[in-house]
Image: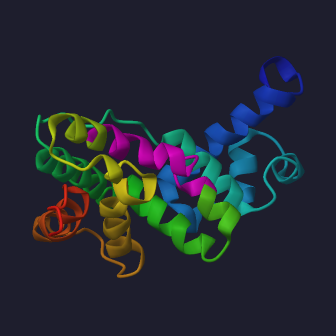
Amino acid sequence: MGAGGTRRRGAALEEAILHAAVAELTASGYAGLTMDKVAARAGTNKNAIYRRWPNRLALGIAAYRQLAITVPPPDTGDLRGDVLELLRQANRHWSSPLGAILRELLSAAGGASQALAQLREQSGDAVAAPWLTILGRAVARGEASPEALHPRVATVAIVLLRNEFVMRGAPTTSDDVLVEIVDEVYLPLVRRRAPTA
């Protein structure tokens, strides 16, 4: 029940549940997140939670999305600098306590494609947006080929970094690896190719 003994419904109840789930997630990580704890903290019952989120993973993802923040893409005036800074921001995030929660959620999602899609910062478009922004600036400066302005090409660097965390289980990635991703893979991929003879 809410303040004054009135029963909360709709958006007010959903907000209380999400607030409780965020608090549990930040306090105990995904491993410690339970429907019982969230229900107790929100002052409701588990049925109210299950009507909105079918399982613990769905609730964990919804709570994580409340915590995730959007950072404007860097603008160093140089493609290499922008890509490195964007990778460093992602590396700091995934190495942080919040990033540990994200890694737990990704691991729990396993092959659940719908859950994985929800975890990818709302949509593939949201993931690609900062990369397309910095790549668009680079194209305008003549540092990259216009053909590189494709979401799959633009996001190669972040996919390779995510692979370090998800597939290799790394708690953080060294700056040497970030530089290698940029210099050995990303820049050669997006730069204008020399005309063939």
Residue, x 79% and y 28% (percent of image)? 11
Q: In the image, is 156 to the left or to the right of 51?
A: left
Q: In this rendering, would 95 be left or right of 152?
A: left
Find residue 194 and report its horizontal and vertical position in percent: 14, 62
Dividing the image into 4 quarters, which one contains the N terminus? top right
When the figure is inspected, residue 54 is found, relative to residue 73, above or below; the finding is below
Which residue does the image show at 74% across and 58% down from the upper left? Answer: 35
The residue closer to the viewer here, 193 or 108, is: 193
Comparing 23 with 140, the one in front is 140
Is residue 68 depicted above or below 168 in this figure? above
Q: Position of residue 32 (x, y in %)?
A: 57, 64
Place of residue 78 in the rendered image (x, y in percent of width and height, measured from the top left): 11, 41
Q: How is the image coloured?
A: rainbow
Front-most of 163 and 63? 163
**Residue placed most toward the observer, 75 or 120:** 75
Q: In this rendering, is residue 15 above or below 88?
A: above
Q: Residue at x 18, y 44 (%)?
A: 82
Can residue 34 be seen by looking at this rendering? no
Residue 120 shown in magenta: yes
Horizontally, is 48 left or right of 184 in the view?
A: right
Q: Is residue 144 rendered magenta in the image?
A: no
Q: Which residues are magenta?
A: 118-134
Based on the displayed image, in which of its 4 quarters is residue 4 positioned? top right
Q: Main secondary structure of the magenta part?
A: helix
Looking at the rendered image, the quarter that the C terminus falls into is bottom left
Q: Residue furthest top?
A: 4
User: Quarter-wise, where is residue 31 in the image?
Assistant: bottom right
Vertical placement of 137 versus 177: above or below?
above
